[in-house]
Amino acid sequence: SFQLSARGHWSTWPAFASGQSVLRNHKPCCAPEERQSGNKQTLLTTPKPRYLEQLESYLRKELQSLDLTKKNSQELKLQPYREIFEFFIDNFKTYKPLLSAIKNEYEVTLAHQKKTIRALEPLKAMVTTVSEECTRQILALQEKEKDEINTLKQEKQHLLKFIDNMKEEKISLQTQVEHLQTSVAEEYARYLNEYGARKVLLAKLNDMHNERLEMTRHQVQDVKGEDVVKLTLALKIARQDLTKAQVKLNTTIADYGDVVPRRDFESLEKKYSDLLQEMKTLQKDFDQLHKEYEALLEIQRETAEERDNFCAELQRVQHNCTPRPNWAKCSEVIPGGADRWGCLAEGKTSDQLVGVLLEEIGTGALREINVFPGWGKGDQVPVYLRHEGEVKNKKLTKKDVVNILKDVWREKIALEQQTGKRSSLPEFFLSYLQKKYGDAAAMEWSYTLYENMRLCRSNHVLSSFYDILTGKVGEEQYHGQNQLISSLQKELAARDSSNSGSLTSKQFRQEANSFPLKRKESIQELVDASRCKLDSTEDLIDYISLFKEDEEGNAEPFVAKLRTQYVREKQEYLSQLKNKLGDLTEVNADDLKTAFCTIDPDIDDQTLDTYIGLAYQVQREQPDQEVVPVETALERLLAGDVRRVGPSPREGSTAGFEGE
């Protein structure tokens, strides 16, 4: 290594040299070869510079005085080196700018690194926290899966034991069959021997009988003196007959020597059939158990694969997705505290909870507003909101709004029944408020009711009135839903012969099945909704309470499910219609009629004309020449009361889409 001399030239003093002398009279113009040879000679004679010794002594002293056990020992240790470097820079004036720039750049880089480290420390803590949470969840999943795996293993061991027992029982039965076969063979041999002995005994008895007869004949011949020639001839004939009988007997013995008695044969055959049938049954059971065991093994393997996939997916989702919001915090700002928030949030998704939260925030802000700005009196402003200037906020409760809107519906329906004509809801709404509260205060009530309806989307009474008032939905849909609910309520009451207000689950299901176009899943949803407040052991359903509403107009889950199915079946019906129209962007009345008749063959002409009128915004005129975009026609049909009339042609009586 080289050092700088006091004059600013490079010193050739080596690091291992000692002493105080430095190289003098350096000639910068000398040749490189001469300079190199001179340096080699000087290396052996040049001592260490005094200034270098002072710097090294100062550095050792400062390092020894430091307390290196502290947390920031490295920074403390760096400080003496920094001071030595500054001394070094100050003593060499020629290279001071360059060395200062180098030092400053190092300082800036160190400061930047420290800043980066400080910025990364919170991330390190967060990574540690997330890692601990993931580890905890993985352990929880493993613990949860452990019970299921243990259960499957126990079931597997049980099945293996059962299979071993079946195998042992099969071996035992085979042993019994072999033993029975041996017994049958022994019995057969014994009966065959007895049969042969019996035949021999009969032959002996016949011989003895013949001898006795022969003796008797001789005695008679002697007594009577019969003719010897005649007796000889009779004896010869008798012997010929005996020979024939013996030949026939031998033939019979040869033909039936291996035959057992029919009684024994039938008994053994019956035993064999029973044992064979029992063995076949056991073999069939064994094969079935073996198949079930293999199926369980396959299910266990698939379950393990799904568990691994779910764990990997969970880790990926936890790594990529943002944390789920803690909805419980909302209870701290919602009026009513945790109890009310629990009721509002029960059974709702995150998207629905956002709507509930916005509704609560909006209604809270609405109570703080004293006046509303008027919308003006332009033609684009609804008739019930045409006003210049500010309008006072009546600050109504939701209960008051619900009661007013229900009264509006009652008055409107009564008026239409008297006049026989359908009136416009916006105009009737304004006239109702003017009649009840006067022309001066009508706009105050109108603006207040409008803002409450606009904000409270979770309340069916307010949201349905707002949609019809603003033209998003036709009034026919509101009346159609009410007619559906009223019809079902009457049917249930008619089924209740004892007027007790309750029906059994079987009776309720039978009545729900009176909707011919509903699927089994939809019927089950209604039954489940009717039993949501019952214990599993209760069988009686209080059908009257299913149609009740609270003071804010909120219906029971059963009625809410009926309305949800009504909207869903309409959407499915129109989705079928859209698929039937295919890639058409515009449609005329004839094509739309054809599409309706294709997806709903039972539709009548009057209903078809009504649907065509909704799509083309005409009454009973024939809109054959008019063409509208398909999306526009579907939007108009969606706003009206459109329902399937008959079953789908693909599904017959069990329609794939719901209807009344």
Image: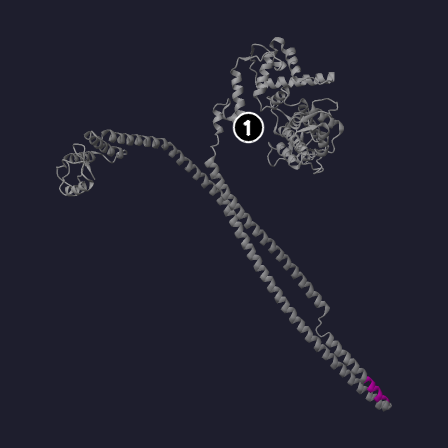
- Is residue 14 visible to the viewer in this orientation of the structure? no
Q: Residue furthest top?
A: 440
- Is residue 206 visible to the viewer in this orientation of the structure? yes
Disc 1 element: helix
- Across and down, in percent, residue 542 comes to 64, 30
- Across and down, in percent, residue 228 comes to 85, 91
Q: Nearer the viewer, residue 550 or 293?
A: 293
**Picture quadrant where residue 235 is located:** bottom right
Provide the residue span drawn in magenta.
Answer: 230-238
Relative horizontal placement of residue 126, taking residue 185 as reference (left or right): left
- From the image, give the main secondary structure of the stretch colored magenta: helix
**Quarter of the figure with the N terminus:** top left
Q: Which residue is mark 1?
A: 352
What kind of residue is marked 1?
A: Gln
Q: Residues within 10 Å of mark 1 (few under 14, many from 20)?
A: few
Is residue 580 placed above or below 442 in the rendered structure? below
Relative horizontal placement of residue 44, taking residue 118 as reference (left or right): left
Residue 658 included in the magenta stretch of the image: no
- Across and down, in percent, residue 66 comes to 21, 34
**Picture quadrant where residue 4 is located:** top left
Relative horizontal placement of residue 606, taking residue 56 as reference (left or right): right
**Quarter of the figure with the C terminus:** top right
